[in-house]
Image (cartoon, rainbow, N blue to C red):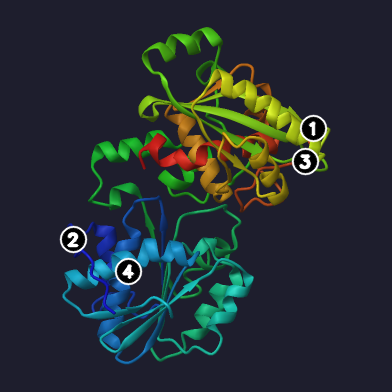
């Protein structure tokens, strides 16, 4: 059944977007290239321009053919590609049919199959498919095996592959094997920056530039394939982000707390069990880490349950509006905590991807939305000591080698991740 969608409101395309839009046209000097890759900063307009280009190319050259549209996950694909695709087709007055159960869209006799590429086994679903072309969104997040299989499936005469991504590390396989070898592999390569998106106002671009620092600024704003090395939270500053009790009391007089949450990370061998209490002030002006429980030694269920009851009773007496507790996914301990403190709703932590959590924390620091009380020494030390894992330079992974307290970071993130959008207005 056709899904009703609001028509896409087109704005004038930038010069870079027009290059992407028309690269395959008969008058283009790169029309004979087999692939196009667009990388660069976030919100630079590459996704919409590529989607329009891919659809126009497929309509112009094929009837009754199959195509591949892939994203990091089905959820991300539907949000970032399928929804705008429906809006674009509506704006172009082109009828289409979207089969949600089988994950494909048909337009004018062509069929566009939808795939998630979230693990090595994802390539298996492409087996047996013969395609006339493919569109891959955020390709640098795909397993290499999926990309290779996707390209191999595009075997019709004149087939082309359209790929876009945000940068990762400079030694990432996608950069080394495709972008760096673009000329040798007959790939048309375009690099996008914020100014290549005409729909962004200057104030919005300035806000994005303020939000990110360090490696995230280089990757997300400058669009560089920057090495993730050294300190992660380079924006963390004790003078800005660590408060005394006196400073807190002065601030709260004008900006009272609205509610409080607790994050819990369960320990194991070589790690610690951590409870973190976070308060959110009115209108989400700040997230303030008020207190922590840190135990690196005793991981028995009875001990943790006792510590949980004792700590939450004290916190509840001081801060009655504790709305939720978000726990690591340990079913038996969650059940135990729920029974021990029925007055506090205990939920599974969302556990967003590590890259998203690090990025959100970095933005909270950059925009002064994060405060850590001086008594939370373990979390403070964790922010200051967290470094990238040199063994995995192409992944956003925090090094846990016995010197970095990952547990306090996870506990803090579990308590705040539900409210990232409200805090950052994104």
Q: Position of residue 52 (x, y in %)?
A: 28, 70
Q: How far separated are the C-alphas under marks 2 and 1?
A: 56 Å
- Residue marked by disc 4: 51
Q: Position of residue 145 (x, y in %)?
A: 60, 73
Is residue 23 among what the camera can see? no
Please identify the quadrant where the C terminus is shown.
top left
- Residue marked by disc 3: 401
The disc at residue 296 is 1
- Residue marked by disc 2: 10
Q: How far separated are the C-alphas under marks 3 and 4?
A: 43 Å
Q: Image point 63% across, 27% down: which residue?
A: 312
The reply to whether discs 3 and 1 touch (Cβ–Cβ < 8 Å) is: no
Tell me which label, 3 or 2, sits earlier in the chain. Answer: 2
Q: Is residue 124 left or right of residue 296?
A: left
The reply to whether discs 3 and 2 touch (Cβ–Cβ < 8 Å) is: no
Is residue 151 among what the camera can see? yes
Question: Helix, strand, or loop for circle 4?
Answer: helix
Q: Residues within 10 Å of mark 4 (few under 14, many from 20)?
A: many
């Amino acid at each position: 059944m056709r899904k009703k969608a609001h028509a896409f409101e087109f704005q004038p395309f930038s010069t870079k977007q027009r290059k992407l839009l028309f690269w395959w046209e008969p008058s283009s000097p790169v029309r004979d290239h087999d692939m196009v890759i667009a990388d660069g900063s976030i919100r630079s307009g590459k996704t919409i321009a590529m989607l329009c280009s891919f659809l126009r190319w497929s309509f112009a050259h094929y009837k009754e053919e199959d195509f591949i549209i892939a994203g990091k996950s089905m959820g991300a694909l539907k949000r970032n590609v399928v929804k705008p695709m429906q809006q674009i087709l509506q704006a172009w007055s082109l009828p289409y049919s979207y089969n949600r159960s089988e994950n494909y869209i048909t337009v004018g006799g062509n069929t566009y199959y939808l795939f998630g590429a979230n693990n090595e086994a994802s390539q298996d679903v492409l087996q047996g498919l013969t395609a006339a072309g493919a569109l891959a969104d955020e390709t640098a997040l795909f397993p290499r095996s999926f990309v290779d299989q996707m390209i191999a499936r595009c075997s019709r005469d004149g087939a082309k592959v359209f790929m876009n991504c945000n940068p990762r590390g400079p030694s990432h396989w996608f950069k080394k094997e495709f972008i760096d070898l673009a000329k040798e592999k007959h790939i048309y390569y375009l690099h996008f920056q914020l100014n290549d998106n005409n729909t962004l106002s200057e104030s919005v671009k300035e806000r994005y530039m303020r939000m990110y620092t360090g490696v995230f600024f280089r990757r997300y704003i400058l669009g560089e394939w920057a090495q993730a090395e050294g300190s992660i939270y380079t924006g963390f500053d004790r003078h800005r982000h660590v408060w005394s009790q006196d400073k807190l009391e002065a601030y709260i007089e004008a900006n009272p707390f609205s509610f409080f949450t607790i994050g819990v990370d369960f320990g194991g061998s070589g790690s610690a069990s951590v409870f973190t209490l976070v308060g959110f002030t009115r209108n989400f002006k700040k997230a303030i880490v008020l207190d922590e429980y840190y135990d690196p030694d005793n991981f028995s269920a009875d001990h943790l349950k006792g510590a949980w009851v004792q700590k939450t009773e004290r916190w509840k007496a001081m801060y009655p509006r504790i709305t939720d507790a978000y726990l690591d996914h340990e079913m038996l301990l969650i059940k135990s905590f729920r029974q021990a403190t029925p007055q506090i709703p205990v939920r599974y932590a969302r556990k967003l991807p590590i890259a998203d959590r690090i990025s959100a924390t970095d933005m909270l620091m950059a925009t002064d939305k994060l405060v850590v009380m001086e008594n939370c020494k373990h979390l403070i030390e964790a922010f200051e000591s967290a470094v990238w894992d040199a063994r995995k330079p192409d992944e956003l992974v925090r090094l846990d080698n016995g010197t970095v307290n990952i547990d306090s970071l996870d506990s803090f993130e579990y308590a705040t991740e539900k409210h990232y959008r409200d805090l950052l207005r994104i």
